[in-house]
Image (cartoon, helix red, strand yellow):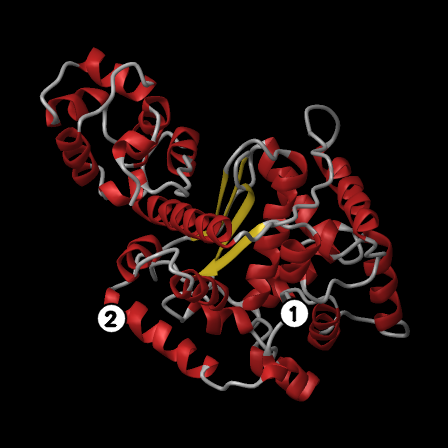
């Protein structure tokens, strides 16, 4: 742990302000905790008056953090929570849960990367903006431009998650939220950590794919504004309508999607469930998203999806009858989401512990897991590494 004297008063004040805002504590209440006036608390947060150790301990406890976390040299103090809070007029427990989780995941990942000397390369195209023009037209054009920028062409995107993480360098997390949560995804951009997306891993793969494409729209069009995507979103605002249109256009480009549909239905007199199942499978989207895109492009009549829903829907069992084993898609992210700590974070945590960069206690606090769970994780990786052979050594 760093000594209080090793951190400047200005940096310490900034960390305390962010911790207070994340905990949703008013300056007046924080001042009472350490028995000072509000102007004194303001001076502490601005670096004009150094904080004393006993005051730091009291505030850390009240903010739900620790002195160690506030003093650690490499600690990342992000302010994602207050950024989202300012976005919304009312508090929602499920949204608060999701935002705090994203904040914790980002903080832990960045701090471990910094400690291990891992450089994350972001490859962001310019933010396009959506101030003027028809948002649907803008979304279609921007989606086409991004595909070109990525060298994707117009064909189906087989793995949007890998594209987001590796091709663009966006921080992507897929974790389970509370069972009652209506949050489908979060997006935020913060200069010190870059673009970040959290997806609700409770949702089916196809829905998460659509949510990821939606959040990618915010990344392209309104990057500076944090966003919460909820189930049954009405998409009334200009920003939401743009992101929703972008998501559909990115996953199902007009020209390619129309051509696929016309080839598939050539010689047919009616749209059938089989058509929808095959087309959705080809483009790695949900059957609902497939039909709604067909309606949007006027390739079928409006209300087709509503008709399917009122007439038994399009069931998974029917998809298995049409596609066979191909109907069952591998969803590695769900398995990773069931782990206490993700695979990548586990490996980084073990490396940091083995190099003596973090103690078990520090890692437990950083990753928000119990010491016994962290110890089990480390022991498992240690056992795997016990196989000693020069052939297994990685090049430096």
Q: Which residue is drawn at 42% across and 41% down?
A: 76
Q: How far apart are marks 2 and 1 (CA)?
A: 33 Å
Q: What residue is disc 2 on? A: 372
Q: Nearer the viewer, mark 2 or mark 1?
A: 1
Q: Identify whether 212 is placed above or below 268.
A: above
Write down the quadrant of residue 276 in the picture.
Answer: bottom right
Q: Is 28 above or below relative to 348?
A: above
Q: What element carries label 2?
A: helix
Q: In which quarter of the image is residue 295?
A: bottom right
Determine whether 335 is above or below 214 in the image.
below
Residue 65 at least partly seen: no
Instruction: Farthest residue to the left: give it.
Output: 35
Q: Give the left or right position of residue 185, taking residue 121 as reference.
A: left
| Mark 1 secondary-structure assignment | loop
**Residue at position x 62%, y 62% from top?**
288
| Residue matched to label 1 | 395
In this view, which residue lies farthest toward the top? 39
Q: Which of marks 2 and 1 is nearer the N terminus?
A: 2
In screen coordinates, is 255 left or right of 242?
right
* Residue at 15 percent of width and 29 percent of height: 55
């Amino acid at each position: 742990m760093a000594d209080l004297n090793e951190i400047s008063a200005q940096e310490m004040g900034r960390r305390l302000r962010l911790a207070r805002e994340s905990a949703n504590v008013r300056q007046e209440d924080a001042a009472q905790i350490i028995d000072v006036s509000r102007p004194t608390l303001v001076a502490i947060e601005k670096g004009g008056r150094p904080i004393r150790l006993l005051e730091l301990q009291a505030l850390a406890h009240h903010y739900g953090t620790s002195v160690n976390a506030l003093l650690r040299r490499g600690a990342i103090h992000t302010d994602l929570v207050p950024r989202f809070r300012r976005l919304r007029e009312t508090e929602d427990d499920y949204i608060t849960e999701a935002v705090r989780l994203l904040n914790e995941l980002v903080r832990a990942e960045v701090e471990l990367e910094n400690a291990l000397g891992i450089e994350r390369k972001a490859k962001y195209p310019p933010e396009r903006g959506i101030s003027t023009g028809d948002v649907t037209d803008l979304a279609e054009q921007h989606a086409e431009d991004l595909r070109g920028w990525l060298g994707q062409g117009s064909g189906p995107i087989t793995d949007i998650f890998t594209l987001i993480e590796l091709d663009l360098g966006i921080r992507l997390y897929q974790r389970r939220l509370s069972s009652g949560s209506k949050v489908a995804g979060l997006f935020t951009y913060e200069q010190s950590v870059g673009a970040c997306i959290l997806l609700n891993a409770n949702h089916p793969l196809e829905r998460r794919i659509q949510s990821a494409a939606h959040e990618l729209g915010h990344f392209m069009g309104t990057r500076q504004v944090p966003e919460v995507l909820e189930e049954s979103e009405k998409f009334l605002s200009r920003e939401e309508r743009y992101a929703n249109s972008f998501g559909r256009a990115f996953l199902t480009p007009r020209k390619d999607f129309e051509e696929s549909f016309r080839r598939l239905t050539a010689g047919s007199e009616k749209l059938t469930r089989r058509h929808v199942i095959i087309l959705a499978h080809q483009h790695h989207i949900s059957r609902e998203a497939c039909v709604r895109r067909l309606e949007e492009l006027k390739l079928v009549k409006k209300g087709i999806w509503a008709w399917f829903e009122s007439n038994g829907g399009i069931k998974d069992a029917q998809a298995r009858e049409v596609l066979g084993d191909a109907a069952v898609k591998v969803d590695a992210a769900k398995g990773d989401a069931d782990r206490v700590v993700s695979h990548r974070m586990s490996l980084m945590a073990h490396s940091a512990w083995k190099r003596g960069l973090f103690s078990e206690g520090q890692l437990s606090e950083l990753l928000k897991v119990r010491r016994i769970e962290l110890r089990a994780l480390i022991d498992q990786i240690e056992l795997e590494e016990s196989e000693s052979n020069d052939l297994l050594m990685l090049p430096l």
